[in-house]
Amino acid sequence: MANPATPADRFKIRQALERARNCEPDAVDRNTSAILETAITNLWQRIQDAPDSYVLNGDEFALFNYFRVRYRDNRTAQLAVERFWNNYRGNSANSDGGKT
């Protein structure tokens, strides 16, 4: 399943994720938090829409990994991460969530 986010959205999410990683969890600014919360909510919905087949792309995995504690005990989340690693191809030019 392809990632419906636009390239501009993906860039904005990557920037927000980088800012969040570079500060203490309680020091993340509201704008950055809002971007990441919206992104993880949308991603989680896509995973739930295809719980047995959705394959995260690299950017989605990075976002999901940032929120990993939130989904630590969720079997659907565990399987999504497993599918990512089973389909991981390194620095593939394909970044839309599809297999290469």
Image: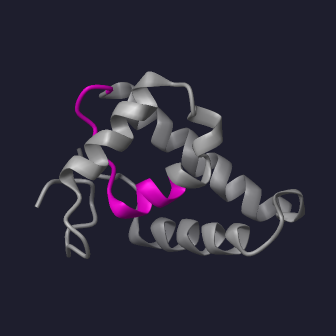
Residue placed most toward the observer, 36 or 76: 76
Query: Where is 5 relative to 55, above or below?
Result: below
Q: What's the image's color scheme?
A: one colour
Can you tell which quarter of the image residue 48 is in? top left
Q: Please tell me whether residue 28 belongs to the stretch shown in magenta.
A: no
User: Compared to 8, does 52 lie above or below?
Assistant: above
List x then y, in percent, for residue 88. 23, 59
Between 54 and 65, the residue placed more toward the observer is 65
Q: Residue at x 63, y 74 (%)?
A: 18
Question: Can you see residue 38?
Answer: yes
Q: Residue at x 33, y 26 (%)?
A: 51
Report the front residue among 85 and 32: 85
Residue 69 is situated, as x and y percent measured from the top left of the image, at: 64, 40
Residue drawn 21% across and 48% down? Answer: 86
- 47 left or right of 62 in image: left
Rendered image quadrant of residue 30: bottom right
From the image, which quarter does the C terminus lie in? bottom left
Q: Is residue 51 above or below residue 90?
A: above
Number of numbered labels in the structure image: 0
Q: Quadrant of the N terminus?
A: top left
x then y, percent, for residue 82 = 31, 41
Region in magenta = 51-63
Q: Residue at x 26, y 26 (%)?
A: 52
x, y (%) of residue 9? 50, 65
> Furthest residue to the right?
27
Residue 55 in view of the camera? no
The image quadrant of residue 61 is bottom left
Check if residue 52 falls in the magenta segment.
yes
Seen in the image, is 71 located left or right of residue 92? right
